[in-house]
Image (cartoon, grey):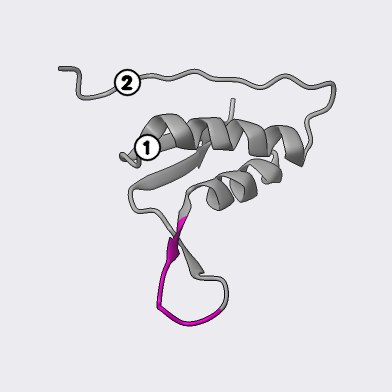
């Protein structure tokens, strides 16, 4: 058993916009299985927003309306600077 894994994924588009970044964040969320993860990004602010939206879950309270969303634990987002 390997305790850590490197996963490289990607999405292709003519422009680097929020739709593309959201698609990538969704792909990463689906393969992590809610395990601890370190996400390394460049300086584009959209990455932080997209990954925060992708890595959250609904907190059901039994009340009417949409459930509150809370961030998943053990998610670290870091910026890589050359």
Q: Which residue is depicted at the point 69% across and 44% down?
A: 46
In the image, what residue occupies the spot 57% across and 36% down? 25
Q: Which residue occupies 33% across, 48% down?
A: 74
Query: Magenta stretch containing residue 26, yes or no?
Result: no
Name the spot of residue 43 as percent of width and height, x first: 66, 38
Residue 33: image quadrant is top left
Circle 2: is it few (<14), some (14-19), or many (20+) Cα within 10 Å? few
**Looking at the picture, how far across and down is residue 58, in whole percent?**
45, 62
Quickly name the residue at label 1. Answer: 37
Tell how many labels.
2
Q: Nearer the viewer, residue 48 or 60?
A: 60
Please indicate whether residue 47 sits to the left or right of residue 59 in the image.
right
Quadrant in which the C terminus is drawn: top right
Can you say which quadrant of the picture contains the N terminus?
Answer: top left
Q: Is residue 34 above or below residue 7?
A: below
Q: Residue at x 47, y 37 (%)?
A: 29
Main SS, magenta region, reads: loop
Label 2: which secondary element: loop
Q: Picture coordinates of residue 2 (x, y %)?
A: 19, 18
Label 2, on which residue?
5
**Which disc is residue 19 wearing?**
none
Q: Which residues are magenta?
A: 57-64
Taking the magenta stretch, the answer to whether it contains residue 60 is: yes
Give residue 66's quadrant in the image: bottom right
Dot 2 or dot 1: first in sequence order is 2
Is residue 32 toward the left or the right of residue 2 in the image? right
């Amino acid at each position: 058993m390997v305790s850590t894994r490197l996963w490289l994924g990607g999405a292709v588009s003519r422009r680097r916009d929020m739709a593309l970044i959201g698609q990538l964040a969704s792909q990463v969320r689906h393969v992590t299985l809610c395990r601890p993860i370190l996400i390394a990004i460049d300086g584009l602010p959209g990455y932080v927003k997209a990954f925060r939206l992708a890595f959250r879950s609904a907190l059901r309270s039994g009340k009417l309306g949409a459930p509150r969303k809370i961030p998943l634990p053990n998610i670290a987002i870091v910026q890589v600077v050359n």
